[in-house]
Amino acid sequence: MSLARTLGIGLTGLNGQLIEIEADVGNGIPGFLLLGLPDASLNESRERIRSAARNSGIPLPNRRITVNLTPATLHKRGSGFDLAILLATLAADRSITPQPEVVYLAELGLDGSLRPVAGVLPSVMAAVRAGYPEIVVAAGNLAEAELVAGAKVRSYDHLSQLLADCGADPSELRFRARHHSPQRKPGAWEGLDVRALDLAEVVGQAQGRYALEVAAAGGHHLLLTGPPGAGKTMLAQRLPGLLPDLDDTQAMETTAVHSLAAGGGQITALIRRPPFEAPHHSASMVALIGGGSGVPRPGAASRAHRGVLFLDESPEFSATALDALRQPLESGVLTLHRAAGTATYPARFQLVMAANPCPCGRNLGKGTDCTCTPMQRRRYLARLSGPLLDRIDMQLFVPQLSAREMASRGPVESSALVAARVREARVQQRDRLKRWGIGTNAELPGSILRNELRLVAAATAGLNKAAESLRLSARGYDRVLRIAWSIADLNSHACPTAGDVDVALQLRQRGKGDVG
C-alpha cells in the first residue's frame, strides 16, 4: 500500500479546522505535487521537506509523490503543515509507521530541526475540540501548547528523534544535537511595560485622574483633548495599570490572538495583564483593524482585546482607519472578508484617543497664539467623525498645568490604590450583571438600562433636561447612564443617584477646547 495519512490543523482567523494530509507514492516521472489550495509558503514546503528528510537520514523516495490536503476547498497557509506532510510521505513509502490520530504542528528546517510556528494555541484548542488531544509540536512551542486543558503534548528538537519513535531504523538516522533557536523578540504586548508606569507620576490633572478611574471601573472609552504637554499620553499609558487581571476565559482569548499575531515560540504563559497597543498615527487601516492578502490577519484592535487601544495624536490617523473602528466599538468583534476567506477576531478593547485642539496645538482661549488657518483646523478635526465621537463614552478636556501645579508636591494616589477601588467596583458590577452574561457596565445594552436597570425619575431629571439642550443622541444618552453606573459602583451605591448622573454627564462633555 502506498497511501498514508496524517493530521494537521488549518486556521482561518482563530477558528481551526482539522486537515487530513493524504500522501501517495506511486510510479511515474519523479516529482512532488501538493494539492489542496496551498499558499506560497506552503508550496515552498516541498523543498524544506526534501532537505529535512535527507539530512535526517531517510530521504524521500525518488518516485512520484502526491500530497492532498483535505478538505480541498479550504485555503491552507503557513509552514505548520511541514511535519505532517513529511510523515505522511514517509509512511506511504513504508519507511515509518506514525501513530494514528495524532496532530502534527511544526515547521521543518533544512537540517531537520523542528521549528516553532505561529498560532499553536488556537490550533491545539481546535484539535482538542475535534476529539484529537494527541499533539506533536516543536520544542519551542511546547509551553504554549500545554496551556490548553486536555491536550497531551509531545515535543521534539529534531526530526530524527520523532522518526525513531515512529519505527525508523536507528542505524539510518542522523541524530543531531539539541537545536538552539535564536533569541526571539518580545511579543507586541511587551513593547511597553505598563505595569511599571504609576499614576502617582502624573502631576495635577485631578479630573483626568478621576476620569481614568471611572473608565477603568466600567470599561469605558475615553477621549482626551488638550494642548501638547498637558499629560494626555501619561494618563492613557497608566490606564492598563488600573485594570484587573484577566480571568481564565479572557486570558485564553487574548493569548490566542497574540499566538497568531506575534509569531511562533513567543508564548510561554497565558497573558493575564490587559494588553496595551499604541500604533503610530501613520498606521494604515489594515494595520489597525487587520486584513492583508489571503486570509486576513489580526490588527492592533484585536491585539488590544481585553486591554487598551491608545491612539495618540488621533486626528493624524486617516479618517478611513478611524471610522473602521466604529463597528468593533459596538460589537466587540471584527469580521474581515477577503477572497481567500472570512476571519473573525475578538476586539473588545477600551479605546483611548488623545487629540490637540488644532495642528499647532495652541488654539486655546481666544486662540491668539494659534498659527493654523481655519481650513487647517477644520480638516484636522473632521477626521474625528461625529458617529465615531458618539461612540466614545467619556470626552475630557485636559488643561495645561500652571507653574504652581507643576511645582506642587502634594500627596497623590498611586496606581495600586486606585486599582484596588477599581477591583471592588468590578466585583459589584459583576454580581449585578452576571445574570445577563455581561462583564462591564460599558457593555450594557440600552434595553436593560431602560427596563431592569431603569433609574427613578428623580435621578435622571437633570439628564433629561440636558439631553435636549446638548442634543444627545439615544446612544449618547445610554452612555451617560453606563458611566453613572460605574460612578455608583466606585461610590458603593446600590444604584446611581442624581449626583452620580450629573457627574457622568460632565464626563460625557468635552467642555473647553472642544474637538468637533
Image (spheres, rainbow, N blue to C red):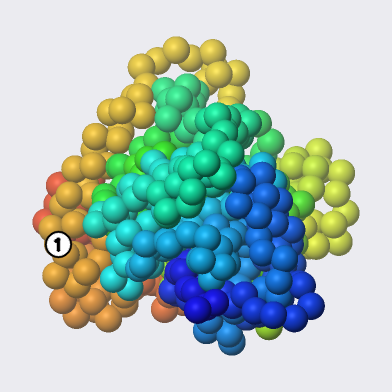
Instruction: Report the front residue among 100 and 69.
Output: 100
Q: Residues within 10 Å of mark 1 (few under 14, many from 20)?
A: some
Q: Is residue 419 visible?
A: yes
Q: Is residue 16 above or below residue 374?
A: below
Q: Residue at x 53, y 30 (%)?
A: 178
Name the residue carrying label 1: 432
Instruction: Kindly state the secondary structure of the residue where label 1 is placed.
Output: helix
Q: Describe residue 158's horizontal placement relative to residue 62 as left or right.
A: left
Residue 267: image x %, image y %? 46, 43
Q: Describe residue 154's horizontal placement relative to residue 131 as left or right.
A: right
Residue 360: image x %, image y %? 80, 43
Residue 173: image x %, image y %? 55, 43
Q: Is residue 118 visible?
A: no
Instruction: Report the front residue among 11 and 413.
Output: 11
Residue 283: image x %, image y %? 72, 54
Q: Describe residue 150's horizontal placement relative to residue 357 as left or right.
A: left
Instruction: Report the front residue among 145 and 56.
Output: 56
Furthest residue in direction bottom, as rendered: 73
Q: Residue at x 59, y 77 (%)?
A: 24
Residue type at the position of mark 1: Arg
Q: Residue at x 17, y 49 (%)?
A: 427
The total number of labels drawn is: 1
Instruction: Report the front residue among 262 and 428.
Output: 262
Residue 196: quadrant of the picture: top left
Q: Residue at x 85, y 49 (%)?
A: 372
Q: Is residue 339 above or below residue 420?
A: below
Q: Describe residue 117's horizontal placement relative to residue 429 as left or right.
A: right
> Where does the C terminus fall, quadrant-wise?
bottom right
